[in-house]
Amino acid sequence: MEIYGAEVFPSPSTITSVGRKILKEDPEHPGSLGIAISEAIEDVLRDEKSRYCLGSVLNHVLLHQTIIGLEAKMQMEKLGEYSDYIIGCVGGGSNFAGIAYPFVRDVLKGKSVVEFIAIEPKAAPTMTRGKYTYDYGDTGELTPLLKMHTVGHKYRVPPIHAGGLRYHGVAPTISILVNHGIVKPIAYHQNEVFRAAVFFAKHEGIVPAPESAHAVKAAIDIARNLKKSNEKKVILFNLSGHGLLDLSGYQEYLEGKLPDYEPERINLTYLPKIQ
């Protein structure tokens, strides 16, 4: 970004009140998507000519992303196939929804049977351990309240390498689908995710992004189980990015320096009380 003239301020930064407050309370805070959203909103509010487009979490964003699933569906139709499993990683949810929602529509209309699997990190277990309640979409409490699975907007998300999955909540529509059992959430540690990513890279020649590697891990596990049971199924997963921007994460994994994180308990007592 700097090569092309941008001025970059790592979040949490000292140029917003939200960032300064967080750094004052915790100078070593690793940042999070929730904090970055707060800082971006605060910055935009200073300038009447500025606009802010949120790239994840909100339901309309998820619908925009479904061009991915619509294209995948058409490609599979040309092959005469349909997915039995659809897998995607989840931070805010747009990645997973983008690939899955066109197929979810078929399932809700009774046209097909698909197992939808949403993968998150154990370091930010919003769907697998979070509470379904109202919470802010950002750390600084600048967004409207959203009813979603959340581990709390003040949760200090550990510094795992899957930066796009380091978020405290998940989109409201995905939360509803999880509640109704239409989407099955699974959480992984980052070491097992990187192990699957290296396996995938050796066999496919593609180094996946740490976020995408969560979906890769699930796809490999399912494929191995199907092979054991001698079942023939179609697996569709979203390889949403390459890992060339996070080779330091791969380096730490290969050197055995990558820690796993998982909260012992999740404090949600500060969340707004809404009946």
Image: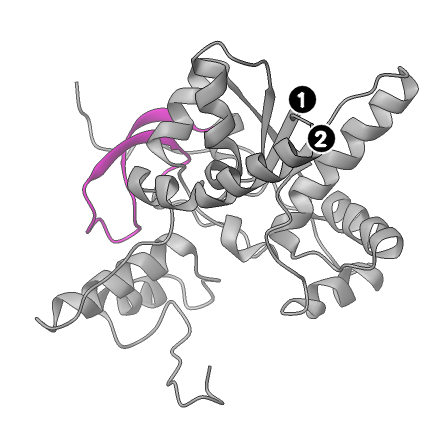
What is the crowding at mark 1: few (fewer than 14 residues within 10 Å), some, or many (at least 20)? some
Q: Secondary structure at mark 1?
A: loop
Depth check: give the residue in front, 233 or 259: 233
Q: Quadrant of the C terminus?
A: top left
The amino acid beneath tag 1 is Asp
Depth check: give the residue in front, 206 or 232: 232
Count the numbered circles shown.
2
What is the crowding at mark 2: few (fewer than 14 residues within 10 Å), some, or many (at least 20)? some
Q: Is residue 212 left or right of residue 9?
A: right
Q: Is residue 122 magenta?
A: no
Q: Is residue 149 magenta?
A: yes
Residue 170: x, y in percent?
A: 41, 37
Residue 148: x, y in percent?
A: 34, 30
Residue 138: x, y in percent?
A: 30, 49
Query: Which residue range is magenta in the image?
Result: 130-152
Nearer-N-terminus badge (1/2): 1
Residue named by callout 2: 235
Residue named by callout 1: 84
Q: Residues under labels 1 and 2: Cα distance?
A: 6 Å
The amino acid beneath tag 2 is Ile
On residue 216, the disc is: none
Q: Residue at x 82, y 56 (%)?
A: 201
Q: Residue pushed farthest left?
A: 48
Would residue 198 be seen by someone viewing this image from the given angle? yes
Q: Is residue 53 left or right of residue 260?
A: left
Residue 252: x, y in percent?
A: 75, 64
Q: Is residue 197 above or below residue 85?
A: below
Q: Residue at x 60, y 19 (%)?
A: 114
